[in-house]
Image: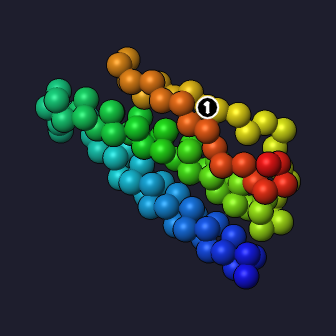
């Protein structure tokens, strides 16, 4: 039953990644010439935060893929630091695959 749970976890991560990538395409396709300065800054900030979320989701999807047996484990699953803005700092510790725990 654990195999099914691992596949469902991987499927959910892939769904989230697809949705985030579509959002990146939508935000990247906007013309800054048609925006006010505030709208352009918000769009840029949204893209930055979305990039951080995509990286986190990719790391989680990789761990799920390793648990499913379709990817090789990485050497390092240590914490990752993100600086999405000048004021924010986040440290994310990715999920480790079962073989690395």
Q: Report x, y in % for residue 44.
A: 33, 33
Q: Quadrant of residue 79?
A: top right
Q: Quadrant of residue 35?
A: top left
Residue highlighted by disc 1: 80
Q: Report x, y in % for residue 92.
A: 56, 36
Determine whether 57 is above or below 85 in the image. below
Q: Residues within 10 Å of mark 1 (few under 14, many from 20)?
A: few
Front residue (pair 55, 18): 55
Q: What residue is at 61 percent from the left and 31 percent from the top?
A: 80
In the rendered image, the quadrant that contains the N terminus is bottom right
Q: What residue is at 45 percent from the left and 24 percent from the top?
A: 89
Q: Report x, y in % for residue 22.
A: 43, 58
Q: Report x, y in % for residue 101.
A: 79, 48
Q: What residue is at 55 percent from the left and 68 percent from the top?
A: 12
Determine whether 66 is above or below 68 in the image. above
Q: What residue is at 64 percent from the left and 57 percent from the top?
A: 61
**Is disc 1 placed on a helix, strand or loop?**
strand
Left or right: 49 as drawn, with respect to 41 = right
Determine whether 19 is above or below 55 in the image. below
Residue that sits furthest to the left in the current view: 36
Left or right: 101 as drawn, with respect to 58 = right
Residue that sits furthest to the top in the current view: 86
């Amino acid at each position: 039953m654990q195999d099914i749970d691992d596949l469902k976890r991987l499927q959910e991560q892939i769904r989230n990644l697809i949705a985030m990538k579509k959002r990146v395409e939508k935000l990247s396709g906007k013309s800054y010439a048609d925006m006010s300065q505030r709208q352009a800054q918000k769009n840029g900030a949204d893209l930055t935060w979305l990039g951080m979320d995509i990286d986190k989701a990719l790391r989680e999807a990789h761990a799920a893929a390793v648990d499913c047996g379709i990817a090789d484990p990485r050497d390092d699953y240590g914490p990752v630091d993100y600086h999405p803005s000048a004021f924010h700092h986040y440290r994310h510790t990715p999920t480790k695959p079962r073989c690395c725990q």
